[in-house]
Image (cartoon, rainbow, N blue to C red):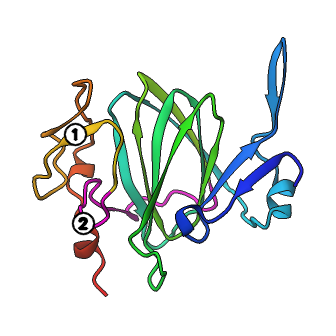
Amino acid sequence: MGQIKVTYNLSDIEGLCLIESTVHGDERGYFMETFSQKDMYEAGLYFSFVQDNQSMSTKGVLRGLHFQKKFPQTKLVRVIKGSVYDVAVDLRAGSPTYGKYHGEILTEDNRKQYLIPRGFAHGFLVLSDMAEFCYKCDDFYHANDEGGLAWNDPEIGIKWPEVCGDYPGNADASGYKLTDGHPLILSEKDQKWLGIKDTFKF
């Protein structure tokens, strides 16, 4: 399949994929194709991306868990500086893995890309001193359409690496820290999301 290797259905969750590009290196450095629609199509991944985003975050920052409600997005995410633990949670009604999550360590050195289809919540924790995070989306950002889940919802049970603390019954991060004593940092908004049972009532 051209310049990429694809690992499909991570943790047996249909649609979640890990993509590794062929790296061409010599004494000067390296070159790699970070995206080829041709290779994606050959791999059976038929997405048309319309927007690229990039963020920088410092150590201990946790962003998520986010999704768009009426305009869901497929995301192809990677790290170009530093390292993060990146998580996707299956929110597809009727999915046999509804509520299940899969996490991947993404770093500037492993150059892995994580493909997260529509119907998932997404978030990441910065493990390095800082991280630059890039991702493609197959729909545009829509203001006032964002939804979210509590990052520490025990029903989902995400095992965030290096995070320690006692669950206070909500998404408040003030009682948590990293194992090296560094504070866990969440936005005010991300500390107000509810758990999956209170967010989705079927």
Q: Position of residue 84 (x, y in %)?
A: 47, 37
Q: Position of residue 124 (x, y in %)?
A: 42, 45
* Residue 6 is covered by the magenta coloring: no
Residue at image mark 2: 195
Q: Is 41 left, or right, of 50 in this rendering? A: right
Where is residue 122, by image quadrant?
bottom left
Q: Position of residue 161 (x, y in %)?
A: 36, 40
Secondary structure mostly seen in magenta is loop
Q: Is 60 left, or right, of 126 in this rendering? A: left
Specify start and end residues of the magenta stretch as a single range. Answer: 137-157
Q: Where is residue 71 in the image (x, y as percent from the top left)?
A: 51, 69
Q: Which residue is at the far left? A: 168
Q: State which mark lies toward you, 1 or 2.
A: 1
**Residue at the spot x=37%, y=62% of the render?**
144
Q: In which quarter of the image is the N terminus?
A: bottom right
Residue at image mark 1: 164
